[in-house]
Amino acid sequence: MQRIEGLVPAPNWTSAAGALEGILAHAGIVLPRHAVMGLTGHAWHFCLGAEGGVVALPSGPAQFDRAAMVERYARTGLRFERFAAAAEGGRDAAVNWARERLDAGVPLIGWDFHLHEFGIVTGYDTDRGGFFVEDLLTEQVGAFVPWDAWPLLGWIELWAPIEPVEVEVPGVLVAALETAAALLDGREGDAEPGLLGWRGLEAWAEAFDGATEVDRAGNAYTLAVLQAARADGAAFLRDAASALPDARQAIEAAARALEEEVKALAPLITLFPFPTGGHGNVAVPGLRGSAAMVLRRAARHERECLAALDDALRLLNG
């Protein structure tokens, strides 16, 4: 049995970023949550989970470009490598890949163990045939996850830190702002463009305005993830504005737009609290109309943020 002690994900509605922050801390790299979120792009992601005529499914927040994370996570000062494959035909290779790194004392970020979220793989037990994982459910169900029960959704995702890397400022901040603009504008992601970025917020509003079914629990979860991510994004932009004086005013304008979005979303967090989702509130016509108005306001703030970021990048890139 091999196990690395002292590793836990940091609290974060975006579980991948929480796992990353835990790995960074273990490596001696201490960054505030908003820096981790902003540098990696998690602060700017939005995808409206939709399938079978139902929207705001809880799958949306996890539908991001995972291949891009290898490069983006390096912005935090730690280089990563990735193993990704379908479970059918790929599980044995994934387990061997993971064991090699765990034997060397290298923890992993992984997907879909106790639940459809990211966690930290701290070790394995060959006799029992499984990993030890720290994630949102570990305290309730224990750390052990059998290999034959993983992954729950059939797709393997593992990321391993390789080595520390030197982070160049301001280059890393400019790259993060470029990622922010791309994600807010829905130019990348694991879904059709109309469900990504500010257009995804508009699609969410349209669903509330019509008769489309809105998933109760997924709606509450997606709102919580979105508001927390944008709050971190605003804090990151405030820091970036101080570090990039040539574009300070434009970046501060982008931060203000996100701060207004966070305030605009607050009533919906109350109306659709996680995990209950406000029980039947998603089906009440008047409340649905109010939710649609708030989401359109949030989309407008995101477009304002995007416009300000475009101005900043024009200044920074000459």
Image (cartoon, rainbow, N blue to C red):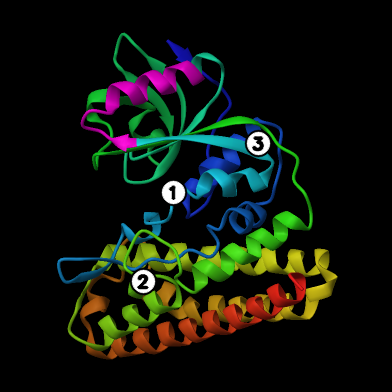
Amino acid type at circle 3 is: Ala
Q: Quadrant of residue 174?
A: bottom right
Q: Position of residue 190 (x, y in %)?
A: 36, 58
Residue in front for this viewpoint, 154 or 170: 170
Q: Quadrant of the N terminus?
A: top left
Q: Can the viewer see residue 117? A: yes
Residue in front for this viewpoint, 280 or 246: 246
Q: Position of residue 73 (x, y in %)?
A: 59, 45
Name the residue beneath numbered marker 2: 193
Image: 199 above or below 239? below
Image: 287 above or below 188? below
Looking at marks 3 and 2 on the same chain, the residue that comes earlier in the sequence is marked by 3
Q: Can the viewer see residue 10? A: no
Indicate yes or no whether the magenta region holds residue 93: yes
In the visual, does 54 lie left or right of 119?
left
Name the residue beneath numbered marker 3: 25
Image: 78 above or below 46? above
Residue at point 56%, 42% (across, down): 20
Name the residue beneath numbered marker 1: 66
Looking at marks 1 and 2 on the same chain, the residue that comes earlier in the sequence is marked by 1
Q: Quadrant of residue 41?
A: bottom right
**Within 10 Å of the Cα at label 3, are there few (<14), some (14-19), or many (20+) other Cα atoms?**
some
Indicate yes or no whether the magenta region holds residue 210: no
In the image, which residues are magenta?
85-101
